[in-house]
Image: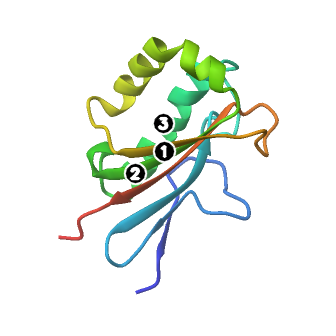
């Protein structure tokens, strides 16, 4: 079976990449999501708002593939400002739980110099497993 491209309904086209690729075994690879909405517009300019939007984008991709956030097994975070992340831990936790509840998959965080989209402050990629039965 060829991998199936996952693209939530109503989202602006993904040009040159896929938001999600669902493999025959149920593994869902979710490309890096940044803090823009379905129209590729940054509504939030701050770190917490962009983080919550990126997580919401991931959740929507998982749901478009037939799963839910509890099917996510891994998150990799790419953050431009380590000190803002550390200074806002309480808000990070609150925003995280608004989207993922108390589901905490394996996570890695990398501090990066920059991201492709100039306004982006964070990018998060994920891997989930969507039961095929």
Q: Secondary structure at mark 3?
A: helix
Residue lying at the far left in this picture: please name it.
133
First-in-chain label (3 vs 1): 3
Q: Is residue 105 above or below residue 79?
A: below
User: Residue 108's mark?
Assistant: 1
Q: Position of residue 56 (x, y in %)?
A: 47, 35
Query: Of the residues tagged 3 and 1, which is closer to the observer?
Result: 1
What number is the disc on residue 74? Answer: 2
Of 60 and 55, which appears nearest the observer?
55
Q: In the image, residue 119 lies at what x, y percent?
A: 78, 31
In space, the residues marked 2 and 3 are separated at their CA atoms by 12 Å
Q: Where, by quadrant of the figure, is residue 43 drawn?
A: top right
Closer to the camera in the image, 106 or 5: 106
- The secondary element bearing badge 1 is classed as strand
- Point out the image quarter for the N terminus: bottom left
Disc 2 on helix, strand or loop? strand
**Label 3 neighbourhood size at 10 Å, few (<14), some (14-19), many (20+)?**
many
Determine whether label 2 and label 1 are within 8 Å by CB: yes
Q: Which residue is mark 3?
A: 55
**Spot occupied by residue 123 in the image (x, y as percentages of width and height):** 62, 41
Label 3 and label 1: CA atoms lie apart by 14 Å
């Amino acid at each position: 079976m060829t991998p199936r491209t996952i693209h939530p309904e109503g989202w602006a086209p993904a040009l040159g990449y896929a938001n999600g690729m669902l493999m025959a075994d149920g593994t869902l690879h979710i490309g890096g999501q940044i803090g823009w909405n379905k129209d590729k517009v940054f509504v939030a300019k701050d770190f917490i708002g962009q983080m919550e939007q990126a997580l919401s984008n991931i959740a929507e991709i998982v749901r478009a593939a037939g799963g839910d956030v509890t099917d996510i097994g891994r998150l990799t975070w790419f953050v431009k400002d380590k000190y803002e992340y550390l200074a806002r831990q309480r808000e990070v936790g609150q925003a995280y739980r608004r989207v993922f509840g108390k589901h905490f998959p394996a996570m890695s965080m990398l501090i990066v110099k920059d991201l492709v989209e100039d306004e982006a402050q964070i990018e998060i990629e994920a891997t989930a497993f969507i039961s095929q039965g």
